[in-house]
Every structure is written in structure tokens, then in C-alpha cells.
Image: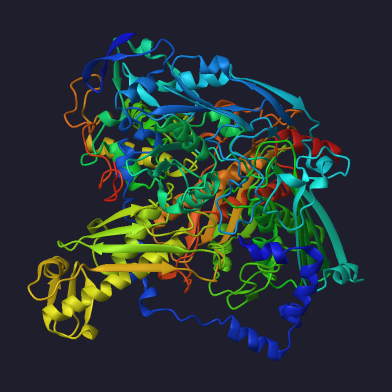
């Protein structure tokens, strides 16, 4: 889904339909030959790929090797530094705590901070009126610019819209005092009516969260009278007519998803101070250093050049840190106290006042012929964005734009989403970004249709799904991002074949006990690789005189291993060992610009920037090699830490070149390489999920024996790390299928305050996960890579629902899948 | 109040408030390898050995550790000389963000000390109160089983040959430089 402004202009329903009909001329199947030719030229299959990008497995020295993750040794010995570990550098550090709304909706009428201010060790109490607290509206979403999320928040707010809204902030000598002072602040409210259910909120008579003047940068389709922050719609072909056809079966199903916590084990943590140059420095646990810098500059009216955002090791993000969630608090407190300030959220705050996955109700509808041809698909999503709209429109867009393109052969497609406010905790970006909700609806629905029409569920999908060479129009049908994309790599067939084999699809043995029934289920998924046409990554490489390198890259490693992938990409180009390169990522004063770690973009976008930087440096290295060997550049290449001649076999080491370049007699040069990368492309990675379950028909209890998931991520830059991404994503997906998530009471207050109350499947509760990497070659990606880390987040809820259906014949459409729900359905039969 | 305890072999006196948890006090004394991801005693990231038993340091009062022998993950191995469990975590790609890993390695080491040849189920049970959001537990479980195999083959004691509560390991890395390039890789303004 688009992260850009075009979507706001084009994303509205009726207009898009009209525009779409004119510009797109219907669907691929309806195009005439001239149009086909024109599209072939505009979206060519052939890609002008450099020869060095497509290496056979035997030609790869660094890429696709299981290289040691470069930061692992400091991680396993506990020596790596996360934001809170910088505490000891600042002897005069103050600690922050936040006073949060205890009511779901109302207006602050009075804040009595006298008791807090009188406490020993309290340095400052900030309220919405304080000088250091910005008045400006903003969105916390860390996205591109102009921002595709509404400016509907304040750093500290008088109009509170959920239990957890920040009202006041404290800085104190130590964390205990700060929290005690926060407890001592007395806030009085005028209480308003509130609404927690999205369907009720969408009613014209519902309590209204936002007045007319309370939002800037509004999003397409907003209707705040009905608490709607956005409406988006897109269409291909003529679905309405297709659904009315005489010869089709129309099925409709409805699916419900949970409010999932990111549960990043390192809490949101941020340290701010003013340095001796009167500049503002943030050491912070973020996925988006450059966006955060821009957002802080906007909010505090400080020039971008005077803000520095540094990312140390990050203890997990998963989208929860693709946002400026906490940074304004310590910055405002450091301005007020002129001291460095550390804010570390509590775990309770993580559950009720940070971010969560948008809970949704998604309807799927298809028109299918007797022969099993899908004539039309329609998806509708009602998304609960909570009290604020960060990532609201873009996440909802992905409910359609990620799963629907899987079935690129379907001629008529419609998607619409309403994004609605309630007085509940804030939502935001989360791994999968709308695709898990859409994939549940689509893949569960198709399974049900296949069963009803007595079609093989796998074959039914295979007849309609993407193939190499397809022109995908669905991903862009809501406007914005690359309206169409040519598919140049697709390993779905092999993913299915190997996934089936791993789960034993054709050879499931039933248990001996009559009341136990074993079933298997499957689901497919596609994601993207970066936001098409809305990404930028950059890198710089400096050669030292001993032939080693410093790699500075804006791409943000949040624990994924991105830094290691960058090293492998650079080493492959430079022909040296990875340990000859020192990587430094994500410090806005030092590293080149990058959009940040989201949308599955890091390896593809930032990695390609690294590759370009390394190639730029290599060009200079070969020039120096040519001079020193007295041979033409055309005969030279790098490898094994040297420049060697393919003609004569002579070579000169990178170290000799480094010294010569830095200290030579006649000419000297600091060998530098720079790379910057953007693209209109966003090739989909694919996943085929398989689940093996046994259900007890007497109790509804079920036992998931195994999750098997095969992923086409192009060429895996590091297979060990890629498998880790797949398994972690599949665990998160499993949680979406079997856990309650963050439950709320009647007032929208989170009922979960720590890990012992949040049902994250533990080591014993998690089934074995078999991750299978299916290699394809994506010519637009660095050494053939596309993304991996999001697509396996989408697939377990539908695959498990399908497996339960297979085992005992009942269908669970409302997540989580529980024994009680299965038993209830069994009783209904 | 002042409490005396031994941390990674070094006997020391630390100041601790009556309400302060052990993890906070250890961190205040430079032991940043003790992590905390919860509001006290639930996520397992802060696991340390207290007199040989695994405890969540953020879930116990510091005063309770008076006179105790505390060992953190830093006592097990150094970056140049990893404990077999640490090495297995590296070799099996069991580490992503790494925040939960110190506690998980402490727990895994304790398991292998008691049970050098655990089943997969026993490994999962041992790690059951260690919250990990990144890995789905698959590779950590594989790493612990791999470490068990290596240690049985090599006859290494579960503590890597260093007696728990015994002599200090000489290079427990607390004085080691942190990130290469210091705080900022050359653009430092501190």
C-alpha cells in the first residue's frame, strides 16, 4: 500500500473508479494486443541487470553463506549496548515518567502537580501548557513525507481519548522518584461519552472523538462525524456484474482478528540531551532514525541539522518502533531541565499506551463458476484504529493490496476499507502491516469455497495464482504506488511442493482414538519488498590504508541481522572477508539517509545502496590496481583480498593499494564509494504455510504438531538469518491464531499489564517450526534478493482454521481459535 | 543500605534501596549484561545465578542477595572465548535482537549442568519462562541441544570449566571496550 500523498488524492472510492476505468482500461484479460504491447514496454519483463548481480551458487563467496552474525558475540556475552545501557555515560542523567489518562474520553480541567513538585529529587513536571511542550499537532507514524497519517496527536494532551493518553511528564533524579511523582499528580477531568466498539463508533449517533479543528493533514475519506479517519477503495474490471452472473456461486464469509502486542522485549526507550554545540541528541530504540529527526524538527521547531538521532542495538521492533512513540517526552524534559533525560516505558505502558496491531473485521466475497473459475473477489475491512490514526489508512490498504495480487488471474476485484476511531489504545505498524488480516479472510474463504464446490484447495489456488511474467494490476489498484508491476520471480509451485512434503500432506495418519481427528490445512501469502516508488536508502564506504573498510549505512538493524547482510553484500563486491569491514548503521550525523526498517525494505533497498557503494569503491580500487600492476582495468577483478589480473595472474593486495593510495609519492586519494538507491519496484516474496493439527471432538481441544512454511525470498543473503526471520514471523503468526492478544475492559482499558498476563506462546506452547527457503532470482534485488521477514507473519491463522475444518468439519472465523469455540461449533452440528 | 555480595567472582559492597530489585542494582554497578524487559520477574531476560540457582534478578529484592554469590552471563565466556552454550547460540543463528539472550543462556547453562542430555521437550520446559519475541524458540532450542552434544563430546562442564561461585574468570569482559568505534563511529561529540 502506498505511503505517499497520491493515495490521498486518488484513494477515494468513486473518483478512483472513474479514473481507474479511464487510465487502466480494465483488466489484463480484457486488454487488446496494442495495449499489451504498450504495457510490455512500460513494465518490461526483461530487467537490465548487471552481470555481477546474478551469481550461480558456486560463484558466491560471501552472499548466501551462513556467515556469523557480526554482533552475536557481544550479544551472547551481554556486552552489546541498547539505549538504556548508555545511562552510565551521563552522571547527571534524569529519569522520566508519564502521567496518563485514567478515563477513556474527556477533557483535562485541572492538573494539580504541587505534591509532585514538592518531592525531593523532582526536577520538572510538564503539562500541556508548559513552554517546553510543543503545541503542534503531529502523527507518531514514522513514514515518508508528506505523511500519509493524520496529524491528530499532541505530545501531552488536554483532550484525552483513551485510558493511556499522556497528560503530564516528570523528570526526577531516579526512576523510582519519577514514578512516585507521576502517581502524586492529580488530574481532574470533564468526562465525555465514549465508544469502544468500532461498529458502534461508526454510527451517526456515536460519541465523536475529534472535532473539526482537531486534525490537520486529514486523510482521504475522513468523516469525523462518524469517527471515520479514512475510507479507501479500489476496483478492477466489473465485479458488480460478475457477482450478478447467472452461472456463478457467490460465497460470503466474515473474519475477526485480535489486538496483538508487538511485545518487543526491549521496551520503548529514549535518551535525549543537549550537547556542547547546543544541538539535540537522541539515543533511541527506533526503526526510523531519519523520520524521527524530521518529525522532531517539525514538532519542536528546531532545524533538522541541529537534531541527531542515534540508534544503538535495538531489542526488537516489529513495527512498534516504526513511530516516534516516546522521543518527544525526554526531549521536552531535557529542554525544561537542561539535563540529559532517559525515558524507558514500563511493560504495563507497552501494553496500554504504546502501539498494537489494528483489530479488524474483514468480509470476503467471491463469485466462482461450476468449473472452479474465480470470476470476482471482493474484500471489505472495518479497521479499528483506536484513539489515533497513525498508520491507519496505509495498514488498511494492505489488507487488500498484499493478499489480493496473489490471484492475479482473477479479472474482477474490489476492495474497500473503513478506518474508524474508538476510545481504545493506539494502534500502529506491525509486521505484516494489514496483510495478516487480509490473508486470514482470503485464504480462509477460498478454503471454504473449495470445500463447498468439492475442489482441491491447492489446485483451486494454483489455477489463479501469480506466475513469472504476470502483470500485476491489483497491488496498485488504489492508486499511489507503482500502479502495476511485472512479476519476475515466483517460487510458489516449489513452495507448495516442499511445504506439502514437510507436513506429510498426502500421508496423514489418523489417531487410533475415535474422538481424535487429525487434519492439515494450508494457506498462501504474498507481501511486498519495500513500498513501491517510496523508498530511499544510501551508504558510504571508506577504505583504510591497511585495505580494510568502514561501511556507513542508514539502513536500520533492529535485531534482524541487517548489518551482517550489508557486510556480506559489500564483501561479495569487494572480494574481501566480511571481517575486513566495520559497519556503522543509523546515526543521522554520520550515516547516509535512509527511510528506515519497515515494509520489508532493508535488504532490498539499503542492501542495494550498499552494493552500489561497494561497486563505486571497487572502481577506484581497480584503477589503483591497474596503475600498480601496469595492466588495463578490463583485465582486473577483486578476490581474496587482492586485485588480480585475469590475463597475467599477477596480483596486488588491497592492503598494498590502501597504503599506496593514502601515502603514495605522486598521487594520493582516499578511496571512497557512495551508493544511493530508490526504485519503483516492489517484488512480492511468497509463502506457503502448512499446519498439522489433531482435534478432540469431545472437548474441542487441539494440538498443533508442526508448522511448516516454505518461503520464496529470492536469494537469501544469509540463509541462517533468513530462517530465523521465517520462524520468528511464524511464531508471531501462530500467536495471532491462538492467543487473545490485548483484551480490553468496558472502558477500553487494557486488561494486560505484564508478560505473565499476555499470552505469548512460550517455548513449550510453540509447535516446532520447519522453515524452508525456496531460492528464486529476483533481478531487481541485490544479488537476487527480495524480502523475507513479513510474509510468514500472515499465514498461520487461515492455515490453522483450515486444518481444524479439515479435522472435525467446523470453521472458526473469529480469532483466536480456542477449544471452547471449536466445542461450541461441534455442539451446533 | 549497603549490602555485600560477590558478583562474577569479585566481592563488593553496593548501595541498594530497600525497594530496589537486584537487576537495577547490578546494572547501576556496570553489569549491563543483566537485562530487564518486564516490570519485575516475568520475562526472564534478567536471569542470573544466585548461589548457583537461576533467579530473575528484576524479580528479587537486592537486599535478598546479601552475602550471595551472583553470576551473570558475562561470567560464562568472553567474545574471544565463548562458553559452549554461547558458541552454539552463535553457530545456530539463535540470536536476533539479543535482548532476551543473556537470561536464556544462563537458563540453558543451568539446564545442561543438571541434565547433560536433555530431550527437545526438556529444553523447551527449561526455557518456558524466557520470553523471546524474535526467534519462535526454534533456533534457541536447536542451539541448546547442539551445545549439549558438543559438551558431552568434549567433556566440558556445563559452566565451561569455570566453577560456579568459584574463582573469578579473569577476563569477564566488564572492562572491555564496547562497540568498535566507541559511541558513534567517529562523529562523536561527547
Whether residue A78 sits left or right of residue A327 in the image: it is left
Q: Position of residue A41 (x, y in %)?
A: 59, 86
- Please indicate, yes or no, whether residue A770 appears anywhere in the rendered image: no
* Residue at x 49%, y 14% (from the top left corner): A119
| The N terminus of chain A: image quadrant | bottom right
> Taking B71 as reference, is B77 above or below it?
below
Residue B110, how many percent across, how many down? 35, 26
Residue A42 visible at all: yes
| Residue farthest to the right, as pictured | A246
Q: Is residue A448 above or below residue A428?
A: below
Q: Quadrant of the C terminus of chain A?
A: top right
> With respect to residue A693, does A600 lie above or below?
below
Compare residues B85 and A364 and report the one nearer the observer.
A364
* Relative height, residue B160 to residue B26 (above, below): below
| Residue at image point 22% right, 58% down | A580
State left or right for residue A197 relative to residue A310. Answer: right
Determine which quarter of the picture holds residue B15. top left
In the image, farthest residue toward the bottom: A34
Residue at image coords 28%, 50%? B185
Residue situated in front as seen by the camera: A202 or A431: A202
Please give left or right for residue A745 compared with residue A242 in the image. Answer: left
Amino acid at each position: 500500500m502506498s505511503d505517499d500523498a497520491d493515495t490521498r488524492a486518488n484513494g477515494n472510492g468513486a473518483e478512483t473508479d472513474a479514473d481507474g476505468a479511464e487510465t487502466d482500461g480494465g483488466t489484463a484479460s480484457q486488454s487488446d494486443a496494442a495495449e499489451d504491447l504498450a504495457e510490455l514496454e512500460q513494465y518490461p519483463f526483461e530487467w537490465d541487470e548487471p552481470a555481477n548481480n546474478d551469481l550461480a551458487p558456486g560463484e558466491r563467496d560471501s552472499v548466501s553463506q551462513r556467515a556469523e552474525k557480526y554482533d552475536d558475540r557481544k550479544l551472547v556475552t551481554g556486552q552489546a549496548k541498547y539505549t538504556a545501557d548508555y545511562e552510565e555515560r551521563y552522571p547527571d542523567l534524569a529519569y522520566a515518567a508519564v502521567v496518563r489518562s485514567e478515563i477513556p474520553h474527556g477533557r483535562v480541567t485541572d492538573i494539580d502537580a504541587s505534591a509532585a513538585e514538592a518531592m525531593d529529587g523532582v526536577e520538572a513536571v510538564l503539562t500541556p501548557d508548559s513552554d517546553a511542550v510543543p503545541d503542534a499537532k503531529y502523527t507518531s507514524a514514522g513514514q515518508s513525507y508528506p505523511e500519509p497519517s493524520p496529524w491528530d496527536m499532541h505530545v501531552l494532551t488536554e483532550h484525552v481519548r483513551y485510558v493511556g493518553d499522556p497528560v503530564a511528564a516528570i523528570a526526577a533524579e531516579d526512576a523510582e522518584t519519577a514514578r512516585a511523582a507521576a502517581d502524586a499528580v492529580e488530574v481532574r477531568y470533564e468526562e465525555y461519552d465514549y465508544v469502544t466498539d468500532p461498529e458502534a463508533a461508526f454510527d451517526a449517533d456515536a460519541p465523536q472523538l475529534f472535532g473539526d479543528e482537531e486534525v490537520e493533514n486529514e486523510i482521504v475519506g475522513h468523516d469525523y462525524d462518524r469517527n471515520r479517519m479514512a475510507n479507501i477503495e479500489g476496483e478492477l474490471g466489473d465485479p458488480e456484474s460478475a457477482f450478478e452472473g447467472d452461472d456463478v456461486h457467490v460465497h460470503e464469509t466474515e473474519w475477526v482478528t485480535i489486538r496483538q502486542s508487538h511485545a518487543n522485549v526491549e521496551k520503548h526507550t529514549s535518551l535525549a540531551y543537549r550537547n556542547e554545540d547546543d544541538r539535540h541528541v537522541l539515543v533511541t530504540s527506533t526503526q526510523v532514525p531519519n523520520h524521527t529527526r524530521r518529525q522532531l524538527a517539525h514538532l519542536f521547531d528546531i532545524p533538522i541539522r541541529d537534531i541527531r538521532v542515534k540508534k544503538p542495538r535495538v531489542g526488537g521492533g516489529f513495527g512498534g518502533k516504526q513511530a516516534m512513540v516516546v522521543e518527544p517526552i525526554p526531549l521536552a524534559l531535557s529542554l525544561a531541565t537542561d539535563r540529559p533525560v532517559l525515558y524507558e516505558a514500563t511493560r504495563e505502558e507497552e501494553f496500554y499506551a504504546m502501539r498494537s496491531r489494528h483489530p479488524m473485521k474483514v468480509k470476503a466475497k467471491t463469485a466462482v463458476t461450476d468449473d472452479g473459475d474465480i470470476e470476482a473477489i471482493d474484500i471489505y475491512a472495518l479497521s479499528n484504529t483506536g484513539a489515533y490514526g497513525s498508520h491507519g489508512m496505509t495498514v488498511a490498504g494492505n489488507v487488500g493490496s498484499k493478499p489480493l495480487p496473489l490471484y492475479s488471474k482473477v479479472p474482477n476485484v474490489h476492495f474497500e476499507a473503513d478506518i474508524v476511531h474508538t476510545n481504545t489504545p493506539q494502534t500502529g505498524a506491525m509486521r505484516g502491516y494489514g496483510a495478516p488480516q487480509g490473508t486470514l479472510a482470503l485464504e480462509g474463504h477460498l478454503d471454504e469455497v473449495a470445500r463447498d464446490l468439492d475442489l482441491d484447495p491447492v489446485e483451486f489456488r494454483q489455477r489463479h495464482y501469480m506466475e513469472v511474467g504476470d502483470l500485476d494490476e491489483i497491488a496498485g489498484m488504489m492508486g499511489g504506488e507503482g500502479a502495476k508491476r511485472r512479476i519476475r520471480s515466483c517460487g510458489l509451485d516449489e513452495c507448495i511442493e516442499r511445504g506439502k512434503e514437510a507436513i506429510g500432506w498426502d500421508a496423514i495418519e489418523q489417531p487410533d482414538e475415535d474422538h481424535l481427528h487429525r487434519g492439515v490445512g494450508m494457506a498462501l501469502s504474498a507481501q511486498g519488498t519495500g513500498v513501491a516508488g517510496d523508498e530511499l536508502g544510501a551508504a558510504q564506504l571508506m577504505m583504510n590504508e591497511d585495505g580494510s573498510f568502514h561501511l556507513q549505512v542508514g539502513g536500520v538493524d533492529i535485531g534482524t541481522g541487517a548489518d551482517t547482510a550489508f557486510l556480506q553484500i559489500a564483501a561479495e563486491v569487494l572480494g574481501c572477508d566480511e571481517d575486513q569491514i566495520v559497519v556503522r548503521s543509523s546515526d543521522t550525523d554520520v550515516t547516509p539517509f535512509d527511510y528506515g526498517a519497515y515494509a520489508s525494505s532493508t535488504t532490498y533497498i539499503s542492501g542495494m545502496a550498499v552494493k552500489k557503494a561497494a561497486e563505486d569503491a571497487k572502481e577506484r580500487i581497480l584503477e589503483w590496481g591497474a596503475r600498480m600492476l601496469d595492466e588495463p582495468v578490463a583485465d582486473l577483478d577483486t578476490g581474496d583480498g587482492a586485485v588480480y589480473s585475469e590475463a597475467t595472474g599477477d596480483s596486488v593486495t588491497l592492503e598494498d593499494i590502501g597504503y599506496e593510495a593514502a601515502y603514495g609519492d605522486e598521487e594520493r586519494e582516499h578511496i571512497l564509494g557512495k551508493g544511493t538507491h530508490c526504485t519503483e519496484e516492489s517484488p512480492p516474496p511468497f509463502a506457503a504455510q502448512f499446519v498439522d493439527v489433531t482435534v478432540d471432538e469431545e472437548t474441542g481441544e487441539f494440538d498443533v504438531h508442526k508448522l511448516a512454511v516454505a518461503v520464496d525470498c529470492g536469494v537469501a543473503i544469509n540463509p541462517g538469518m533468513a530462517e530465523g526471520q521465517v520462524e520468528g514471523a511464524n511464531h508471531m503468526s501462530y500467536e495471532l491464531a491462538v492467543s487473545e492478544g490485548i483484551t480490553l475492559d468496558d472502558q477500553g482499558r487494557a486488561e494486560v499489564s505484564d508478560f505473565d498476563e499476555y499470552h505469548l506462546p512460550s517455548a513449550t506452547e510453540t509447535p516446532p517450526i520447519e522453515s524452508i527457503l525456496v531460492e528464486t532470482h529476483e533481478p531487481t534485488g541485490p544479488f537476487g534478493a527480495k524480502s523475507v521477514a513479513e510474509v510468514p507473519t500472515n499465514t498461520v491463522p487461515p492455515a490453522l482454521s483450515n486444518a481444524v475444518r479439515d479435522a472435525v468439519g467446523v470453521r472458526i472465523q473469529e480469532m483466536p481459535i480456542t477449544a471452547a469455540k471449536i466445542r461450541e461449533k461441534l455442539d451446533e452440528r | 543500605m549497603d549490602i555485600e555480595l560477590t558478583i562474577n567472582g569479585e566481592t563488593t559492597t553496593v548501595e541498594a534501596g530497600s525497594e530496589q530489585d537486584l537487576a537495577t542494582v547490578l546494572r547501576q554497578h556496570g553489569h549491563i549484561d543483566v537485562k530487564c524487559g518486564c516490570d519485575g520477574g516475568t520475562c526472564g531476560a534478567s536471569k542470573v545465578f544466585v548461589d548457583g540457582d537461576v533467579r530473575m534478578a528484576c524479580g528479587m529484592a537486592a537486599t535478598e542477595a546479601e552475602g550471595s554469590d551472583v553470576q551473570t552471563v558475562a561470567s560464562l565466556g568472553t567474545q574471544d572465548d565463548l562458553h559452549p552454550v554461547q558458541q552454539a547460540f552463535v553457530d545456530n543463528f539463535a540470536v536476533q535482537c539479543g535482548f532476551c539472550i543473556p537470561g536464556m543462556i544462563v537458563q540453558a547453562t543451568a539446564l545442561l549442568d543438571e541434565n547433560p542430555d536433555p530431550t527437545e521437550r526438556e529444553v523447551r520446559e527449561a526455557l518456558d519462562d524466557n520470553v523471546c519475541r524474535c526467534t519462535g524458540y526454534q533456533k534457541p532450542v536447536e542451539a541448546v541441544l547442539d551445545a549439549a552434544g558438543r559438551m558431552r563430546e568434549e567433556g566440558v562442564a556445563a559452566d565451561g570449566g569455570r566453577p560456579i561461585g568459584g574463582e573469578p574468570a579473569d577476563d569477564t569482559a566488564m572492562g572491555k571496550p564496547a562497540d568498535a568505534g566507541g559511541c558513534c563511529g567517529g562523529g562523536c561529540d561527547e
